[in-house]
């Protein structure tokens, strides 16, 4: 990856739907050259996909941290991996026998149920389980939230620097 690839990623982080013409214009190359660069980033799995970030007031995000018995890590990981209705992400961390998950629902009771089912299914294979609901998002480059920093290119709707209405209203509240 070179400096141009980094520019492409920074621009696309703020607007994955940007046209190849606009992208090429922003970095000083043709539409075809920009498209070839993006395709290479996709082949190299640097760009792994394109998502729509949807903000919903009624969603509750919860972090679930599980520490497993040393010889039960893979068993627990297998059991939680198929629970996809509320779990959005599962991470293997550097902490020994630790699984970090992100779960989202529109109901606290659904998230409590998820946690109870994990505890029930895994039983003594789990040494510790902790759950924490997200109270406030401080920074999320994909969700265009940065309460304490300046807006970056990735926090805009594209190369022209416009922000979405939510970001503008948040900035007005701070002033």
Image (cartoon, rainbow, N blue to C red):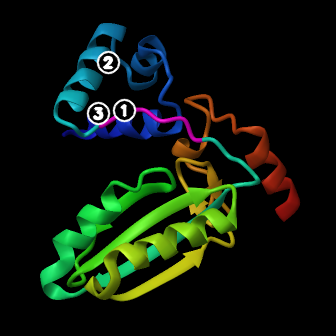
Label of residue 4 in the image: 3
Residue 94 lies left or right of residue 21; in this view the side is left
- The residue furthest left is 71
Q: Given contact means CB atoms under 8 Å apart, are the residues at marks 1 and 3 in contact?
A: yes
Q: Position of residue 107 (x, y in %)?
A: 69, 60
Q: Given contact means CB atoms under 8 Å apart, are the residues at marks 1 and 2 in contact?
A: yes
First in sequence: mark 1 vs mark 2:
1
Mark 1: few/some/many CA within 10 Å (<14, 14-19, 20+): some
Q: Is residue 26 above or below residue 115?
A: above
Look at mark 1 in the image and give the residue it sits on: 8
Q: Given contact means CB atoms under 8 Å apart, are the residues at marks 3 and 2 in contact?
A: no
Measure the C-alpha gap from mark 1 to mark 2.
8 Å
Image quarter for residue 155?
top right
The kind of secondary structure element at disc 2 is: helix
Look at mark 2 in the image and give the residue it sits on: 34
At a point 34% along the width and 83% down the height, the residue shown is 123
Residue 110 lies left or right of residue 30; in this view the side is right
At a point 42% along the width and 40% down the height, the residue shown is 10
Q: Position of residue 19 (x, y in %)?
A: 47, 15
Location of the C terminus (image quadrant): bottom right
Measure the C-alpha gap from mark 3 to mark 2.
10 Å
Residue 34 lies left or right of residue 136; in this view the side is left
In the image, residue 163 lies in the stretch drawn in magenta: no
First in sequence: mark 3 vs mark 2:
3
Between 103 and 40, the one nearer to me in the picture: 103
The kind of secondary structure element at disc 1 is: helix
Between 115 and 57, the one nearer to me in the picture: 115
At a point 53% along the width and 52% down the height, the residue shown is 141
The kind of secondary structure element at disc 3 is: helix
- Which residue range is magenta in the image? 48-53
């Amino acid at each position: 990856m070179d400096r141009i690839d980094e520019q492409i990623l920074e621009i696309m982080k703020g607007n994955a739907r940007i046209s190849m013409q606009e992208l090429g214009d922003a970095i000083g190359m043709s539409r075809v050259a920009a498209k070839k660069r993006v395709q290479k980033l996709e082949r190299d799995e640097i760009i792994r996909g394109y998502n729509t970030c949807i903000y919903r007031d009624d969603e509750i995000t919860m972090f679930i941290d599980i520490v497993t018995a040393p010889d039960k890590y893979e068993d627990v990981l297998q059991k939680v991996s198929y629970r996809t209705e509320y779990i959005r992400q599962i991470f293997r961390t550097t902490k020994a026998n630790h699984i970090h998950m992100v779960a989202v629902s529109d109901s606290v009771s659904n998230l409590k149920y998820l946690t109870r089912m994990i505890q029930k299914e895994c039983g003594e294979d789990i040494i510790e389980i902790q759950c924490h609901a997200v109270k406030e998002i401080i920074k999320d480059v994909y969700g265009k939230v940065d309460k304490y920093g300046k807006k970056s290119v990735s926090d805009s709707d594209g190369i022209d620097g416009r922000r979405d209405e939510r970001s503008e209203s948040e900035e007005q509240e701070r002033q």
